[in-house]
Image (cartoon, rainbow, N blue to C red):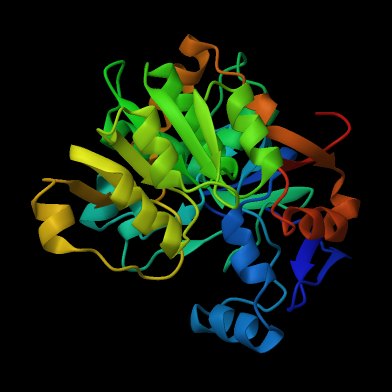
């Protein structure tokens, strides 16, 4: 089978690997669609020495196949697999936990002290096949295409959890900073809940995508001051809710400045730290500021049902499709920051 590995310093390579055989409790999934995530780029941009050091700290291999947003069909199962069978349509939850701690039992696998992940420690989904524990296989209904499911598998799920926690509704105006794939999914979910959404980014192509999927207004932060535009848009009141998916400290500080009295805010993008005026901003505005990460595994069926019920066109967020043989080209393009979602697809998908 073919798989994509990182070589350090923004270099990637397609290699041949033996197709693994599933062992006890394991499932072999043949890929149909697998997307690139912003988290992949953290590893793509590392130096070779830093990449090796990170993976060895988790007893992983420097040659780990990247990717953690897979959808496909079960090819084979190992012994003691009870609920998954060949032919099942599945996506794969990206974190692997101990399955015994309290976090794992309640579905918060990302908090497990022994957590590891696909594409960082375990061979991931930028390959023809991926080998996973049965517990990580999440069933996909026939009504959900593999491409839409790939968008949901990490970016969509992450966005859904943050929007669910912020709970925007028809009475709210919401600012979304950072219109990469996660931020664009958040735009779609917030609009579907009835909110008026203002999208903020630096890239014209992403601002245009946000307008196409329902943003009421957009701000190009290279040309306009987001605070001034949002104050004008809201009649000086500021937004009722906001979320940052960029990880940029200036965007996060701007989000706090744009917040109205009593606003709910979330930090989702991974980046540098930023400063907060606790008295004049947090206390006197009575803000609620939360962090939000990857979704609880138990939310999967809920957000799949939400997408199907609202008929959300997640495929509109896909701007480029590649074959796995074109892995280096795909990662180079995504690194430009000018795309929506990029997918690897297979001919028979």
Q: Horizontal placement of 124 versus 290: left or right? A: right
User: Residue 50 occupies which quadrant of the picture?
Assistant: bottom right
Residue 206 or 190: which is nearer the viewer?
206
Residue 239 or 34: which is nearer the viewer?
239
Residue 30 visible (yes or no) = no
Residue 251 drawn above or below residue 158? below
* Residue 223 location (% of width, % of height): 60, 48
* Residue 89 location (% of width, % of height): 63, 28
- Residue located at (34% from left, 68% from top): 274
- Residue located at (67% from left, 72% from top): 45
Residue 296 or 168: which is nearer the viewer?
168
Q: Horizontal placement of 150 versus 93: left or right? A: right
User: Residue 227 occupies which quadrant of the picture?
Assistant: top left
* Residue 244 location (% of width, % of height): 42, 49
Residue 288 visible (yes or no) = yes
- Residue located at (56% from left, 46% from top): 201
- Residue located at (74% from left, 53% from top): 334
Residue 292 drawn above or below residue 297? below
* Position of the C terminus by quadrant: top right
* Position of the N terminus by quadrant: bottom right
Residue 185 or 237: which is nearer the viewer?
237
Residue 81 drawn above or below residue 306? below
* Residue 213 location (% of width, % of height): 59, 23
């Amino acid at each position: 089978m073919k798989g994509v590995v990182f070589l350090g310093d923004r270099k990637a390579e397609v290699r041949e690997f033996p197709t693994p055989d599933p062992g006890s409790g394991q499932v072999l999934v043949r890929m149909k669609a697998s997307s690139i995530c912003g988290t992949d780029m953290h590893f793509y941009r590392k130096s070779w020495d830093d990449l090796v050091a990170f993976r060895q700290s988790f007893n992983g291999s420097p040659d780990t196949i990247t990717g953690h947003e897979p959808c496909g069909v079960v090819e084979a199962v190992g012994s003691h697999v009870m609920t998954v069978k060949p032919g099942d349509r599945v996506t794969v939850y990206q974190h692997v936990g101990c399955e015994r701690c309290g976090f794992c039992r309640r579905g918060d696998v990302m908090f497990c002290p022994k957590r590891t992940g696909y594409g960082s420690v375990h061979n991931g989904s930028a390959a023809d096949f991926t080998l996973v524990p049965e517990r990580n296989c999440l069933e996909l209904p026939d009504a959900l295409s593999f491409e839409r499911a790939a968008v949901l598998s990490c970016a969509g799920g992450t966005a859904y959890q943050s929007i669910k926690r912020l709970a925007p509704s028809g009475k709210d105006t919401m600012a979304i900073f950072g219109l990469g794939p996660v931020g664009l999914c958040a735009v779609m979910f917030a609009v579907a809940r009835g909110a008026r959404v203002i999208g903020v980014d630096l890239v014209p192509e992403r601002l245009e995508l946000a307008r196409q999927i329902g943003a009421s207004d957009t701000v190009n932060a290279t040309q306009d001051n987001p605070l001034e535009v949002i104050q004008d848009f809201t009649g000086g009141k500021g937004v009722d809710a906001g979320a940052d998916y960029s990880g940029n400290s200036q965007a996060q500080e701007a989000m706090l400045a744009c917040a109205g009295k009593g606003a709910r805010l979330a930090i989702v993008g991974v980046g540098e730290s930023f400063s907060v005026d606790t008295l004049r901003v947090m206390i006197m505005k009575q803000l609620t500021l939360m962090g939000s990460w990857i979704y609880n595994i138990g939310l999967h069926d809920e957000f799949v049902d939400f997408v199907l019920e609202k008929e959300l066109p997640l495929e509109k967020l896909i701007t480029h499709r590649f074959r796995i043989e074109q892995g280096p080209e795909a990662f180079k393009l995504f690194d430009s920051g000018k795309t929506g979602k990029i997918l690897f697809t297979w001919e028979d998908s």
